Image: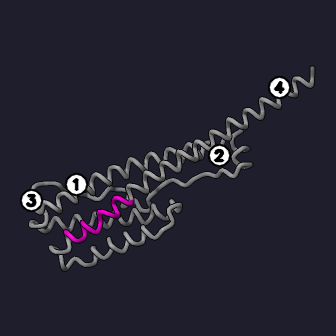
């Protein structure tokens, strides 16, 4: 009788370990999917930036510093390893701030604000920033779920044995970077 009880407990422990391991794998895959969503939006934004810079460049020849910052930060963001969430968050936040300055400069040029091409680029950038914000929220939610599994008992035992670790949140380093670029879609003056 004791042998049966030991066997039942052992089978239950193995079954629980399998269920926990599968939950950890599922959480990791959801995290990878969430990061992919952020990566897609960051790439869309990076692809839009050269068009936006070119549209502004013709009107704002003396605003070179801001244009150079946007271009430099775009290149820097593209050169970072895809998996470096913390560094990407920092550089992408700086890029968001630079884009905000670029759009603010455009407000001083009525001809540029009236340009259909520029207005279309503003709308696209605004839509991408909204999508990026949603993707960040989803990623951070899945990172939270994985971190809870990795840190809570008994799943932390299986996580440690299987090499699962906590994941960083996609955070922006500076409070000013947390705001999306301010884009005015108002009528030209």
CA gap, disc 2 and disc 4: 27 Å
Front: mark 2 or 1: 1
Residue 46: x and y in percent read 35, 64
Which residue carries the number 4 mark?
Answer: 8
Q: Which residues are magenta?
A: 43-55
Q: Distance between the Cα atoms at labels 4 and 3? A: 76 Å
Q: Earlier in the sequence, mark 2 or mark 1?
A: 1
How far apart are labels 4 and 1 at the CA level? 62 Å
Q: Secondary structure at mark 2?
A: helix
Instruction: Please tell me which residue is depicted at 20% across the width and 74% down the height of the picture.
Output: 57
Q: Quadrant of residue 176?
A: bottom left
* Residue picked out by circle 3: 188
102 inside magenta stretch:
no
- Other-residue count near label 3 (Cα within 10 Å), few / some / many at <14 / 14–19 / ≥20: few
Q: Nearer the viewer, mark 1 or mark 3?
A: 1
Instruction: Tell me the tag on residue 150.
Output: 2
Mark 1 — residue?
123
- Tell me whether the residue at label 2 lies in contact with that at label 4, contact meaning CB atoms closer than 8 angstroms: no
Counting residues from the start of the chain, the first of labels 2 and 4 encountered is 4
């Amino acid at each position: 009788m004791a042998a049966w009880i030991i066997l039942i407990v052992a089978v239950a422990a193995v079954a629980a370990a399998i269920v926990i391991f599968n939950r950890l794998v599922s959480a990791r895959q959801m995290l990878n999917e969430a990061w992919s969503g952020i990566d897609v939006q960051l790439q869309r934004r990076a692809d839009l930036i050269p068009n936006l810079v070119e549209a502004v460049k013709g009107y704002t020849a003396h605003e070179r510093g801001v244009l150079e910052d946007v271009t430099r930060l775009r290149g820097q963001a593209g050169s970072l390893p895809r998996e470096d969430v913390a560094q990407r968050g920092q550089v992408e936040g700086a890029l968001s701030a630079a884009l905000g300055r670029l759009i603010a400069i455009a407000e001083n040029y009525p001809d540029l604000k009236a340009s259909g091409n520029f207005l279309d680029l503003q709308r696209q950038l605004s839509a991408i920033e909204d999508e990026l914000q949603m993707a960040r929220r989803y990623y951070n939610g899945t990172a939270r779920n994985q971190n809870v599994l990795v840190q809570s008992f008994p799943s932390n035992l299986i996580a440690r044995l299987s090499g699962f670790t906590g994941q960083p949140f996609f955070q922006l380093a500076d409070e000013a970077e947390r705001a999306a670029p301010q884009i005015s879609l108002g009528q030209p003056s």
